Amino acid sequence: MSAPFGRRACEVTDSHASGGYRVFSLLDLEGPEPRPGQFYMLATESHWAQGGGRPFLPRAFSAADADPLDGGIRLDFLIEGIGPGTDRLCKLEEGERVWLNGPLGNSFSAPRELSAGAAGAILVGGGIGIAPLALLRRRFSAANVPARVLLGFRDKAHSGGLDDLFRCCEVALASDDGHIGHHGYVTDLLATMLEGDDAGSAVVYACGPPPMLDAVAALCRSHGVVAELAMESPMACGFGACFGCAVPRADGDGYIRLCVDGPVVRGA
Ligand SMILES: Cc1cc2nc3c(=O)[nH]c(=O)nc-3n(C[C@H](O)[C@H](O)[C@H](O)COP(=O)(O)OP(=O)(O)OC[C@H]3O[C@@H](n4cnc5c(N)ncnc54)[C@H](O)[C@@H]3O)c2cc1C
Ligand code: FES
């Protein structure tokens, strides 16, 4: 089922700090339910583009969780305040309304769709990129797909979402400053895991900053492991009209629009 045409106003049902990030929930009365990796274009109903100022356009955000309720779907978003749009969303209060367009884009594939012999999944998230992996993990868990989760953060101020989005699941952590988990990169944990006997039977799913995604793709290539990466680029429309999100294909054969051909792409 595709997203309803146009934007719709959804009420904020919860908003709270989650470590250095913020989690808020919207009640979407129309749906459909998002698939893991899909995103929404969001803008607050009030104090957005006031007097033509920034933030002007809506911003893209991954669905971090989604739960069907009586009469709607609860959507959770994980936000890091880094500019006018995210700062405004971080200040949302219960009862306010948010303009929402989506779910948009493609989604992560099941392990068997990517590799016939795949028995399980390894999820690798960095920073705010852990958001789409939370919904992916929940769906894998519901489908009894074994999934191991590796998450990394820069420092304490740039980390969060664990208690809200990854509760009741085992997570291996890394941090650049050593404040939690392994002192180093999350890709160190992935490298160790891929050295293991069963590496070839896994598919890797990753979302995070570009250098992390490059490192994940290179590790997976060298171990012959299939990877899917959720990427980001600045998005103005979110549905293929503006070409603002175009990124070059790795094979040099033109460009893809990340909002419609992604945000999930094959690691190769
Ligand atoms: C598919 C998708 C899913 C996303 N999911 C989330 C999410 O779950 N949580 C979250 O907090 N953020 C997410 N983002 C990122 C978020 O949309 C941007 O950071 C947003 O533009 C911030 O808006 P702003 O007005 O706060 O800051 P802006 O003023 O728009 O940006 C601040 C700085 O970040 C840079 N920047 C902005 N967007 C991007 C981008 N997409 N890629 C690289 N650099 C960028 C700008 O050049 C600028 O320097 C997602 C982006 C995409 C494309
Ligand atoms: S954001 Fe407009 S074409 Fe992708």
Image (spheres, rainbow, N blue to C red):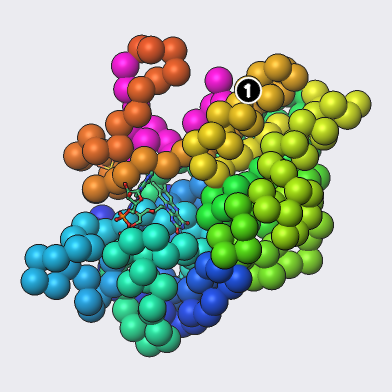
Residue range of the region highlighted in magenta in the rendering: 254-268
| Residue 211 appears in the picture as rendered | yes
Q: Which residue is mark 1?
A: 218
User: Is residue 215 positioned above or below 239 on the image?
Assistant: above
Foreground residue, 12 or 93?
A: 93
Q: In x, y percent, where is residue 138?
A: 68, 57
Amino acid at the residue labelled 1: Ala
Q: Is residue 35 magenta?
A: no
Foreground residue, 83 or 122?
A: 83
Foreground residue, 7 or 155?
A: 155
Q: At 49% across and 58% down in the image, what residue appears? A: 63
Q: In x, y percent, where is residue 27?
A: 44, 75
Which of the 4 quarters of the picture holds residue 214? top right
User: Is residue 173 positioned above or below 162 on the image?
Assistant: above
Q: In x, y percent, where is residue 173?
A: 75, 53
User: Is residue 231 positioned above or below 19 on the image?
Assistant: above
Callout 1 crowding tier (Cα within 10 Å): few <14, some 14–19, many ≥20: some
Q: In x, y percent, where is residue 191?
A: 77, 31
Residue 109 appears left or right of 42: right
Q: At 24% across and 38% down in the image, what residue appears? A: 244
Q: At 81% across and 57% down in the image, what residue appears? A: 170
User: Is residue 174 positioned above or below 27 on the image?
Assistant: above
Residue 255 appears left or right of 55: right
**How many marks can you see?**
1
Q: At 44% across and 18% down in the image, what residue appears? A: 250
| Residue 4 appears in the picture as rendered | no
Q: Which image quarter holds the C terminus?
A: top right
